[in-house]
């Protein structure tokens, strides 16, 4: 089974399973295809995280990149007066996604790497019709980028908004440059991106257009295999990637809620209030402490400890509180889940951060670079403060659900910037506390904490629940656009029969391919 936000990408993963590939092959092939068929959220110039259940064990991969050696708070002050721009070269950090594919494949892959990437190259070369939500996001990006009028975006317009192309459902788009680069990545097991021809092209373009990223930064990049962190709730174990990812925010919230008696009805306002308040405590901790542990110690054991959960629990009251932590910002991401017939499962997420990312595209390659550096703190002394060679606080988080006896349930994720821990929390509660199947767990109306006491809810939550949350002090807003509430995928495996049960996001162009 393959579940993701684009039917064509899911079918690529399915085809690789049919050829004898495993869940990792399917995940990599699907991820590569998503850089082609959903460039509004990810690309070859982004980062990646993965949780892999293979051979009876859960493995974590952190394939996020660091700030270039030349990017510092002093350099930022000199270039932009101390403010981090959203677009252009300055927020570009080292892209870790391609090396993440290669490292996943080297450890667990079965089919040849070039064969795994070949279907994505075919999609790029022959083209494909845009799906509805994709077309809407693409058109919005073109409108925004035209107002920026940045010279460095000239190649972006040539590739993603060529003459005669209007992003609408059914419109055809293709990129020969993207196809050739995918083939080169496949032929070199990703090495060309970091030390070969592509690294040289990236370095040359940065040097010619004012970028700080250099070939030496690319050559120094390595993925990191990590031990997943977890929290227990209702006889289940929820796994996340450790910092510099923000998955710990969801785990802290679950720890807080594990000591509370949530109402039996999912839409009970008292329960929704507790969920929102617990999530705020998780974010307060994450924004204060999550950073690159290679540079700053992050006391994960304390943050996930019973004492911290009890302190947060005692802080909660009957009315909404202001956690006095920075307001989350927006992001754009793709998530996928795969499962094979042998029990292997993958939870994988990759992103260019804000939509298409920085707007910088390397000429002739289709490589759109992310703007992940925008997520550094610019406050000197903060654990997440910008520094050369440091990875930023990262929004993208794959999830995995197991049982406390060690048996796996399966991969899940909800993409979308700072909505992600909130989506993880709600999907887990929908599944474990409220007994929903995967599709129900994803379709259920969501809430989203914005900042302070401000909360957005989907209209399907209902007027009665909304009024009750208002009465508890929440600054409630009903959001008609479902796009900001995240887009998720789920695959659960029955431990006795091996039967797979999946759910795909109804808020986007989601699809489940099975074989």
Image (tube, helix red, strand yellow):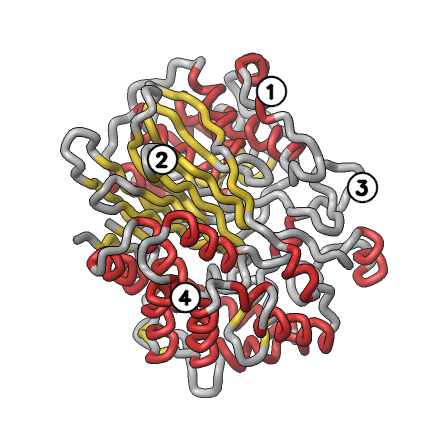
Note whether residue 391 is visible.
Answer: yes
**Marks 3 and 4, how far apart in space?**
39 Å
Label 4 sits on residue: 136
Quick one: SS at disc 1? helix
In the displayed orientation, state which residue is furthest to the bottom.
163
Please tell me whether mark 1 or mark 2 is closer to you in this view: 1
Label 1 sits on residue: 302
Measured as percent of width and height from the top left, residue 306 is found at 53, 14
Q: Earlier in the sequence, mark 2 or mark 4?
A: 4
Please tell me whether mark 3 or mark 2 is closer to you in this view: 3
Cβ–Cβ below 8 Å for labels 1 and 2?
no
In the displayed orientation, state which residue is furthest to the left.
497
Quick one: SS at disc 2? helix
Residue closer to the observer: 497 or 467: 497
Label 3 sits on residue: 380
Q: In the drawing, what numbered circle is on residue 427?
A: 2
Question: Quick check: 382 above or below 365?
Answer: above
């Amino acid at each position: 089974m393959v579940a993701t936000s684009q039917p064509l990408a899911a079918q690529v993963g399915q085809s690789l399973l049919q050829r004898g590939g495993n869940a990792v092959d399917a995940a990599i092939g699907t991820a590569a295809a998503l850089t082609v068929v959903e460039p509004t959220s990810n690309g070859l110039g982004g980062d990646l995280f993965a949780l892999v259940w293979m051979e009876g064990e859960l493995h974590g991969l952190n394939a996020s990149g660091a700030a270039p050696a030349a990017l510092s708070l002093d350099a930022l002050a000199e270039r932009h007066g101390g403010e981090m721009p959203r677009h252009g070269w300055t927020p570009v950090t080292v892209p870790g996604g391609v090396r993440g594919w290669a490292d996943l494949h080297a450890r667990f892959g079965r089919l040849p790497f070039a064969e795994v990437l070949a279907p994505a190259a075919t999609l790029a070369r022959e083209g494909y019709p845009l799906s509805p939500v994709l077309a809407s996001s693409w058109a919005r990006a073109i409108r925004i980028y035209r107002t920026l009028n940045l010279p460095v975006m000239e190649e972006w317009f040539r590739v993603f908004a060529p003459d005669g192309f209007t992003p609408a459902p059914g419109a055809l788009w293709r990129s020969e440059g993207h196809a050739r680069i995918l083939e080169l990545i496949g032929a070199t097991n990703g090495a060309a991106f970091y030390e070969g021809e592509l690294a040289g092209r990236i370095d040359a373009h940065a040097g010619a257009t004012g970028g700080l990223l250099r070939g030496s930064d690319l050559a120094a990049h390595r993925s990191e295999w990590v031990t997943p962190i977890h929290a227990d709730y209702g006889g289940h174990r929820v796994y996340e990637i450790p910092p510099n990812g923000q998955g710990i925010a969801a785990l802290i919230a679950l720890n807080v809620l594990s000591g509370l008696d949530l109402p039996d009805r999912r839409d009970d306002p008292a329960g929704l209030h507790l969920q929102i308040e617990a999530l705020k405590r998780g974010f307060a901790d994450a924004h204060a402490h999550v950073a690159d542990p290679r540079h700053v110690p992050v006391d994960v054991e304390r943050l996930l400890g019973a004492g911290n959960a009890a302190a947060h629990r005692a802080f909660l009251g009957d009315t909404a509180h202001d956690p006095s932590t920075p307001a989350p910002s927006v992001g754009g991401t793709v998530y996928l889940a795969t499962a094979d017939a042998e029990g292997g499962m993958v939870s994988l997420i990759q992103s260019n951060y804000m939509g298409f990312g920085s707007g910088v595209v390397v000429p002739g390659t289709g490589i759109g670079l992310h703007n992940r550096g925008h997520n550094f703190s610019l406050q000197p002394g903060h654990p997440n403060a910008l520094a050369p060679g440091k990875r930023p606080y990262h929004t993208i988080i794959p999830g995995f659900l197991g049982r406390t006896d060690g048996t796996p349930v399966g991969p899940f994720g909800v993409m979308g910037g700072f909505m992600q821990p909130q989506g993880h929390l709600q999907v887990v509660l929908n599944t474990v506390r409220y007994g929903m199947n995967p599709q129900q767990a994803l379709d259920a109306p969501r809430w989203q904490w914005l900042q302070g006491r401000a909360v957005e809810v989907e209209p399907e939550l209902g007027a009665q629940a909304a009024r009750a949350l208002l009465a508890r002090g929440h600054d409630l807003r009903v959001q008609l656009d479902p796009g900001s509430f995240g887009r998720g995928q789920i695959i659960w495996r029955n431990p006795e029969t091996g039967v797979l049960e999946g759910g795909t996001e109804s808020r986007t162009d989601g699809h489940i391919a099975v074989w």
